[in-house]
Image (cartoon, grey):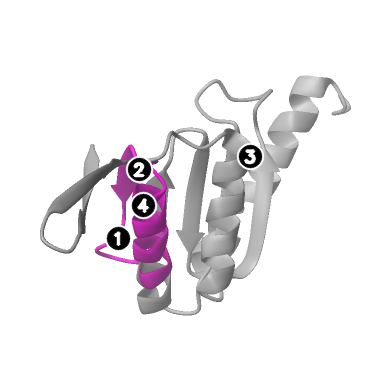
Amino acid sequence: MPLLFKGSKNLKTQTVCEELSSTQLQQLVVSSLEDFKAIDVHTIDVSGDNPLTDCMVIASGNSTRHVKSMAENLIIKAKTSGNPPLGVEGVREGEWVLVDLNDVIVHLMLPQTRAFYNLEKLWEASSQYRSGVSSSA
């Protein structure tokens, strides 16, 4: 998909850069969230636990407007880098926004929503269960 840049009299085209690696995409996500003052950014490596994605990033915003603006900024940065989201859910409400960037899935939530669903603990428990760390009673 070419991008158009205004030249002196002619429009020049330049192709969008290739897709970022999983690590580069994760760095772009974290950087984007930090730029918009995300609260408690947490990354979880799920590459061995989940066939759908390599990493989950979970962060909070202090209001629905804050969560929406973080999501919108992330979507713009991802598109600009040549990695448009596969899907985005929840932007209208802003309580919990999910941005699916394929290798990285981003959950942006209000603090009370994040505390209720506690995704970090869910994935930690899942990882421990798969590795055999959990004890049987």
- Mark 3 or 2, nearer chain start: 3
Residue under label 4: 80
Q: Marks 1 and 3, Cα distance to the nearest angstrom?
A: 25 Å
Residue 94 point in image, percent of width and height: 34, 66
- Contact, CB < 8 Å: mark 3 with mark 2? no
Residue 95 appears in the figure? no
- Mark 4 or 1, nearer chain start: 4
Residue 97 point in image, percent of width and height: 39, 57
Q: Quadrant of the N terminus?
A: top left
- Mark 1 or 3, nearer chain start: 3
Residue 76 point in image, percent of width and height: 34, 58
Q: Which residues are magenta?
A: 69-97
Q: Marks 2 and 1, Cα distance to the nearest angstrom?
A: 13 Å
Q: Is residue 54 magenta?
A: no
Which mark's residue is nearer the viewer, 4 or 1? 4
Residue under label 3: 23
- Mark 4 or 3, nearer chain start: 3
Which mark's residue is nearer the viewer, 3 or 2? 3
Count numbered badges in the picture: 4
Query: Residue at 42% across / 59% down in the picture?
Result: 74
Query: Of 48 and 72, which appears nearest the observer?
Result: 72
